[in-house]
């Protein structure tokens, strides 16, 4: 089901076969620099149970988690 939602939310308009080997960001749909066949243990910005984030969305996520942590202290 996650894959179906991902396909509906981010239609793959990329026709370049070279780029189809790379993961797309689960938040914004941007093609990342992470290959689809890369082991998830070694992927930067991978969210377990959700998928791959691009560097921009990963930084936004990190900044938001710091803001939330600071406001509850």
Image (spheres, helix red, strand yellow):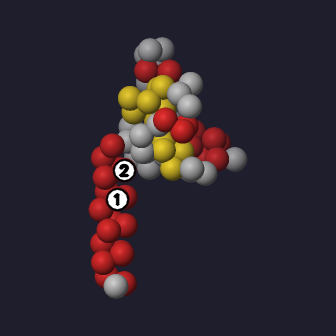
Rendered-image quadrant of the C terminus: bottom left
x and y percent of residue 42 in the render? 49, 35
Please state the horizontal and vertical placement of residue 29, each as a whole percent of the image: 43, 41
SS under mark 1: helix
Q: Position of residue 72 (x, y in %)?
A: 37, 84
Give the label on residue 62, or none: 1
Task: Count all numbered tags in the image, as a single digit.
Answer: 2
In the image, what residue occupies the spot 37% across and 58% down? 61
- Whether residue 48 sits left or right of residue 34 in the image: it is right
Q: Where 7 falls versus 49 (above or below)? A: above
Q: Could you classify mark 1 by the number of other residues whose Cα lies within 10 Å: few (under 14), some (14-19), or many (20 or more)? A: few
Residue closer to the observer: 42 or 47: 42
Left or right of 35 in this view: 48 = right
The furthest residue to the bottom:
73
The secondary structure type at the circle numbered 2 is: helix
Q: Please determine whether, in this image, residue 4 is positioned above or below residue 31.
A: below
In this view, 12 is above or below 49: above
Q: Is residue 48 left or right of residue 57?
A: right
Residue furthest to the front: 41
Answer whether labels 2 and 1 touch (C-beta < 8 Å).
yes
The residue sitting at 48% across, 14% down in the picture is 17
In this picture, is 37 found above or below 11?
A: above
Mark 2 = which residue? 58
* Cα separation between marks 2 and 1: 6 Å
Compared across the picture, whether 58 is left or right of 6 comes to left
């Amino acid at each position: 089901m996650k894959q179906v939602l991902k396909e509906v939310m981010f239609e793959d308009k990329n026709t370049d076969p070279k780029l189809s080997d790379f993961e797309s960001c689960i938040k914004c749909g941007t093609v990342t620099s992470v290959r689809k066949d890369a082991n998830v243990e070694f992927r930067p910005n991978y969210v377990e149970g959700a998928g791959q984030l691009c560097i921009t969305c990963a930084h936004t996520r990190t900044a938001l988690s710091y803001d939330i942590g600071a406001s509850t202290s």
